[in-house]
Image (tube, helix red, strand yellow):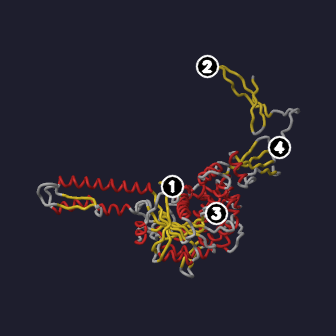
C-alpha cells in the first residue's frame, strides 16, 4: 500500500493506492481517500507581506515626457486654450492638451497618425495630461481641431485662430530666449508644395511642385528666424498660389506680430518692384536674389566683371569658390547698389555643358546632310528644327539645293555664344541695406537654406504629406499641428546647440529622441510598496537630460499602498 499527498484548493489531501500486476506490468491503482492532512504544529504561519514581485503594463515615457515638458514651458496648452476657448486653465480634455499630444505624436511616430488614439494609450501622455482613456477618442481630437478653425455661419467665413496662436507662441519663445540688445530679427521666407490626398477641399489645386507630379496640392509658406531656426508664422494657400502672390499676406502678418523690423531674406522668385517697395515701407531691410529674366538684371550681369582676387573672395561653397563685388546700376527704375557674385566652377561647368551640346548638334547635322541628300528642302528643314530645337540662336543653318557637296551648311554663331557665356556663373543679389559689405550680403543669402531643412523635416521626419483631411478648416489645423510639432523639435535643437560643438544638430536631436523612445515606465509592487521604474534609460541620455536642465524629469518614485 502507498499513501500519496495531493494539493487541492490550498490544502493537502491523503490518498491510498495499491500496486497490482496487469499483463506483466505493475500499475498503481487508487483505493480510497484518507481526508485532509492535519497541519503540523511546528510549521510557521505565512507572512502577511508578499514575497513576490508584481508589475503592471509598461508605458513609453522618455521622449513623450521630455516633449510634454518643453511644450509646458513654452505654454502650448494654455496659449491654445486661452485663444480658442477664452480660458487658459481648463480641466479635462481641452483643445490645447489634445493638439499638443497630437504634435508630440507627429514628432515621434507619424506613421500612427490614423490610429492616434491607440498610440497615445501606449504612452505616458494620459497621465501627464491627467486624462482618462475615455477622453482620448478619435472624435475628441477632431473636435479639438474645430476649436482652432471653424466655419463661422454668422459671417459666412472660416474663423482661423492659427495666426494668433503663432504670434503668441513666438512672443513666449522670444521672452525666454531674447535677442541681444543691439540685435534684430533676421527672417527667412519661402514656400513649398504639400501633396494632397483628398479631392473635395477648396484649397487643393494643381500647381507647380519640385516632384513634377500632376496631383492636387496645398502650399505652405514659412517665416523662420535665422537666429535660432524657430518658426515665427506659417501660411496655408491654395495649391495654385505662387511665392510672388503671397507677399502681401507676409507684410500684413509682419505688422500684426509686432516684431521690431529687422532683415528679411527670400529667394529670387519673390522679387518685384512693388514687393520691394512694400517691404521698405514696412520698415524692413531686404536681401534677395534678382532673376536674370529682368531686363535690367541681364544688363548688369553682362556689363559687370568680377575679378578673381583676394579682395573679392568670399568663401568656398559646395559647388565652387565664390567671388563678389558691389556695383551701382539701374534697377526697379532707380539707381541701386547691388552685389554681383560669381561661381567659377559653375561657369566652367555651364560652358562645358553648352559646348558638349553644340558639338553633338553639329555631328547630327553632318549625319543628316549625308543621309538626307535626296530629301526635299521642306523635309530637311523639319529635321533640322527637330535637331537644333531651342539652340537655334547659337547655330546658323542653310539647306542647299540638290547637287554636289553636303546638302546642309551650318556654323556656330560665335558672337551669340560669347554673349551668353558672359552671364554663366554670375548672379545678382539685392540688399536694401547698403551698409552691408558684399561678403555680408552673400553669406546672409546663402545661409537662408536652413528654411529648406525645415521643409525637409516637415515632409520626411513628420511625414506631413500627403494631407488626408478633406475639409478646409481641418486641413489648416492639420498643417498647424505639424508646424507645432516642429516648434518642439526646434526648441530641443536650440538647447542641444548650446551644449554641443557638432554641426549637424538636426541629427543629434533625432538620435537623442530615438534613444529616449526606448525608455518605458513600469509600476512594480513589492508588498505594500509601489515603485515607478524607468527602464532602458542609458547613461548618455541621462547625462544629456541633466545638462539640458531636466535632471529630475524621469525620476523614479515610491508609493505605499495600505489596501493589501
Q: Is residue 69 left or right of residue 45?
A: left
Name the outermost residue toward the right. Answer: 41
Q: Say if residue 220 shows up in the picture.
A: no
Q: Is residue 273 left or right of residue 520?
A: left
**Residue 132, horizontal then vertical, whole percent:** 69, 60
Real-space CA distance between mark 2 and mark 1, rounded to the nearest whole angstrom? 96 Å
Q: Closer to the observer: label 2 or label 1?
A: 1
Q: Closer to the observer: label 3 or label 1?
A: 1
Q: Closer to the observer: label 1 or label 4?
A: 1
- Residue at the disc numbered 1: 317
> Foreground residue, 506 or 289?
289
Numbered disc total: 4
Real-space CA distance between mark 4 and mark 2, rounded to the nearest whole angstrom? 54 Å
Q: Earlier in the sequence, mark 3 or mark 1?
A: 3
- Residue at the disc numbered 3: 100
Q: Earlier in the sequence, mark 3 or mark 2?
A: 2
Q: Is residue 102 left or right of residue 561?
A: left
**Residue 348, horizontal then vertical, whole percent:** 40, 55
Q: Closer to the observer: label 4 or label 2?
A: 4
- Residue at the disc numbered 4: 49
Amino acid at each position: 500500500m502507498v499513501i500519496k499527498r495531493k494539493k487541492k484548493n490550498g490544502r493537502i489531501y491523503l490518498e491510498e493506492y495499491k500496486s497490482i500486476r496487469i499483463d506483466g506490468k505493475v500499475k498503481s491503482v487508487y483505493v480510497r481517500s484518507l481526508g485532509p492532512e492535519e497541519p503540523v504544529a511546528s510549521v510557521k504561519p505565512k507572512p502577511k507581506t508578499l514575497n513576490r514581485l508584481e508589475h503592471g503594463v509598461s508605458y513609453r515615457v522618455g521622449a513623450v515626457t521630455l516633449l510634454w515638458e518643453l511644450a509646458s514651458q513654452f505654454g502650448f496648452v494654455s496659449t491654445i486654450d486661452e485663444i480658442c476657448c477664452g480660458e487658459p486653465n481648463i480641466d479635462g480634455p481641452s483643445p490645447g492638451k489634445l493638439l499638443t499630444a497630437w504634435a508630440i505624436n507627429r514628432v515621434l511616430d507619424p506613421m500612427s497618425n490614423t490610429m492616434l488614439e491607440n498610440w497615445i494609450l501606449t504612452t505616458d501622455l494620459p497621465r501627464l495630461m491627467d486624462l482618462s482613456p475615455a477622453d482620448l477618442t478619435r472624435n475628441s481630437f477632431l473636435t479639438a481641431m474645430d476649436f482652432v478653425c471653424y466655419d463661422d455661419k454668422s459671417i459666412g467665413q472660416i474663423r482661423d485662430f492659427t495666426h494668433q496662436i503663432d504670434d503668441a507662441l513666438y512672443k513666449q519663445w522670444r521672452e525666454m530666449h531674447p535677442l541681444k540688445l543691439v540685435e534684430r530679427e533676421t527672417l527667412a521666407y519661402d514656400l513649398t508644395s504639400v501633396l494632397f490626398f483628398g479631392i473635395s477641399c477648396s484649397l487643393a489645386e494643381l500647381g507647380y511642385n519640385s516632384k513634377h507630379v500632376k496631383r492636387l496640392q496645398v502650399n505652405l509658406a514659412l517665416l523662420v528666424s535665422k537666429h535660432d531656426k524657430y518658426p515665427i508664422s506659417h501660411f496655408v494657400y491654395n495649391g495654385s498660389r505662387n511665392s510672388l502672390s503671397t507677399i502681401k499676406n507676409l507684410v500684413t502678418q509682419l505688422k500684426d506680430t509686432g516684431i521690431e523690423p529687422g532683415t528679411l531674406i527670400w529667394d529670387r522668385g519673390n522679387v518685384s518692384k512693388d514687393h520691394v517697395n512694400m517691404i521698405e515701407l514696412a520698415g524692413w531691410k531686404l536681401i534677395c536674389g534678382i532673376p536674370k529674366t529682368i531686363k535690367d538684371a541681364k544688363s548688369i550681369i553682362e556689363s559687370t566683371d568680377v575679378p578673381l582676387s583676394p579682395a573679392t573672395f568670399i568663401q568656398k561653397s559646395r559647388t565652387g569658390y565664390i567671388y563678389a563685388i558691389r556695383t551701382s546700376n539701374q534697377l526697379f527704375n532707380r539707381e541701386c547698389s547691388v552685389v554681383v557674385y560669381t561661381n567659377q566652377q559653375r561657369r566652367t561647368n555651364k560652358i562645358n555643358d553648352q559646348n558638349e551640346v553644340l558639338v553633338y548638334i553639329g555631328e547630327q547635322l553632318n549625319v543628316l546632310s549625308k543621309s538626307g541628300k535626296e530629301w526635299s528642302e521642306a523635309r530637311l528643314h523639319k529635321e533640322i528644327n527637330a535637331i537644333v530645337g531651342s539652340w537655334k540662336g547659337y547655330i546658323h543653318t542653310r539647306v542647299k539645293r540638290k547637287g554636289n557637296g553636303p546638302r546642309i551648311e551650318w556654323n556656330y554663331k560665335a558672337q551669340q555664344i560669347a554673349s551668353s557665356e558672359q552671364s554663366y556663373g554670375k548672379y545678382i543679389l539685392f540688399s536694401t541695406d547698403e551698409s552691408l559689405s558684399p561678403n555680408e550680403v552673400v553669406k546672409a543669402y546663402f545661409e537662408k537654406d536652413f528654411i529648406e531643412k525645415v521643409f525637409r523635416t516637415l515632409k520626411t521626419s513628420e511625414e506631413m504629406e500627403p494631407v488626408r483631411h478633406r475639409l478646409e478648416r481641418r486641413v489648416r489645423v492639420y498643417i498647424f499641428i505639424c508646424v507645432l510639432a516642429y516648434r518642439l523639435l526646434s526648441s530641443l535643437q536650440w538647447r542641444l546647440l548650446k551644449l554641443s560643438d557638432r554641426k549637424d544638430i538636426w541629427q543629434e536631436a533625432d538620435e537623442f529622441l530615438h534613444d529616449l523612445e526606448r525608455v518605458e515606465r513600469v509600476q512594480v509592487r513589492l508588498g505594500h510598496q509601489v515603485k515607478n521604474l524607468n527602464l532602458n534609460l542609458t547613461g548618455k541620455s541621462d547625462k544629456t537630460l541633466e545638462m539640458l536642465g531636466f535632471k529630475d524629469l524621469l525620476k523614479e518614485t515610491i508609493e505605499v499602498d495600505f489596501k493589501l
